[in-house]
Amino acid sequence: MTAFDRRELLKGAGVVALAAAAGTPALAQSGGRVVVGTWGGDYARLLTKNIEDPILKAKGIEVIQDQAGDAPRRAKMVAEKRLPRGTVDIQGFSAANMFEMSEAGVTEALDYSKLPNAKNLLPSMKYPYGIGQIYSGNVVIYNPKLISPAPTGFKDWLDPKWGSKIGFIDIQYQSIFIAASLAATGGKDMNDLDKAKEVLMAVKKAGGRVYPTNEAFAQAMKNEEVGISAIWKARVVQWQNAGIPCEAVSPVEGIPIYVSGFVIAKNAPNKENAYAYMDAMLAKPPQEAFAVDMGYNGTVSGLTVDPALQKRIGFTPEEEKRLRDLDYAFLAKNDSAMKEWWDKVFKA
């Protein structure tokens, strides 16, 4: 348990204690019900639009969303580990967080025979403890008006010559470490934290700016306060659709992949409905809809996506060879140290 601190664990424990004191009203009931842990905002809305309303509710399954950031939801899963029945059935996390929860011993070992749609799941998105629902890659984002010539990779993004035009997104600190390591090693190593820190400190001294959220950074890009950073390609597509002046470049050093997926809690009170929810998200209609609505690539084969859209959200055959999965064990082990340095040194 490394990617969230003791305060988050205590918050999760508090939720458990409150539920117990009140006669466990937070517990999902057996029968036609499933409680889904997820981020809020557009993602939660699209789960309802593309999965819950057309598929689950049509089967008579009542869906309840437990919306929160991933850190408190992870903390709650760990705090509820001692309970025979938890409060949430299925949780949405990044691939790194899914791995961490598996290591914490709070996820169900998936029975893929209960997931008929998993027959089309890409092998790289099939984990013993969870499934990938959507994916994208970390690319360089830039404003051609402010940044010229066009960057080719992470090293160009993290060139101190851009000064205050370089932007960072606070919540993306793990991805920033990975990009900085790739920049420093010419694409050879994603995990060289010492060299990554050297690169990042040089950019800090040059005036690089840190923004608290994706949305705050998007506003800064729109106002031309910053001109270059790195973000998931899906976000670039969303921001282009919103009229923000930006282009994407797949980094020559390699394209770290981002996977968003789901795990089932080991003590899920409605486990069969959790499997039904997981299977529904792998059906063709919602997979295709998320490509349109969010700009993410689907994780099952045989999808029909408009070629023009696929060109914007996907990767060429040559770029696909540069897609790189993350070292989830390394991230789980080093996350606390990375976050501490980021907060106390880089942002200080």
Image: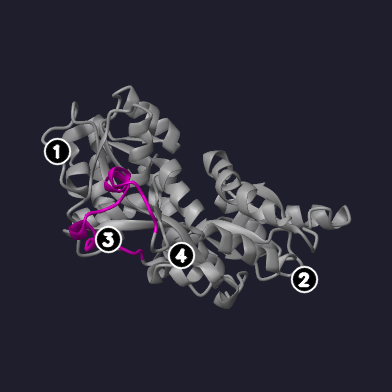
Please name the residue that numbered disc 2 is placed on: 84
Q: From the top left corner, tell me how far across and down residue 146 is, in percent.
A: 19, 27
Q: Nearer the viewer, residue 65 or 280?
A: 280
Q: In the rendered view, would you say 276 is above or below 287?
A: below
Please name the residue that numbered disc 1 is placed on: 150
> Range of the magenta residues?
303-326
Could you tell me the amino acid type at mark 1? Ala
Q: Are marks 2 and 3 in contact (CB under 8 Å)?
A: no
Q: From the top left corner, tell me how far across and down residue 148 is, in percent.
A: 13, 32
Q: Nearer the viewer, mark 2 or mark 4?
A: 2
Q: Tell me if I can see residue 135 in this picture.
A: yes
| Distance between mark 2 and mark 4 Cα atoms | 26 Å
Quarter in which the N terminus is drawn: bottom right
Mark number, residue 323 = 3
Could you tell me the amino acid type at mark 2? Pro
Q: Secondary structure at mark 4?
A: helix
Mark number, residue 332 = 4
Q: From the top left corner, tell me how far across and down residue 55 is, in percent.
A: 62, 54
Q: Quadrant of residue 219?
A: top left
| Distance between mark 2 and mark 1 Cα atoms | 55 Å
| Distance between mark 2 and mark 3 Cα atoms | 40 Å
Could you tell me the amino acid type at mark 3? Leu
Asked whether residue 317 is drawn in magenta, I would say yes
Q: In the rendered view, would you say 238 is above or below 154?
A: above
Asked whether residue 27 is drawn in magenta, I would say no
Residue at 44% in and 59% down? 335
Residue at 60% in and 58% down? 91
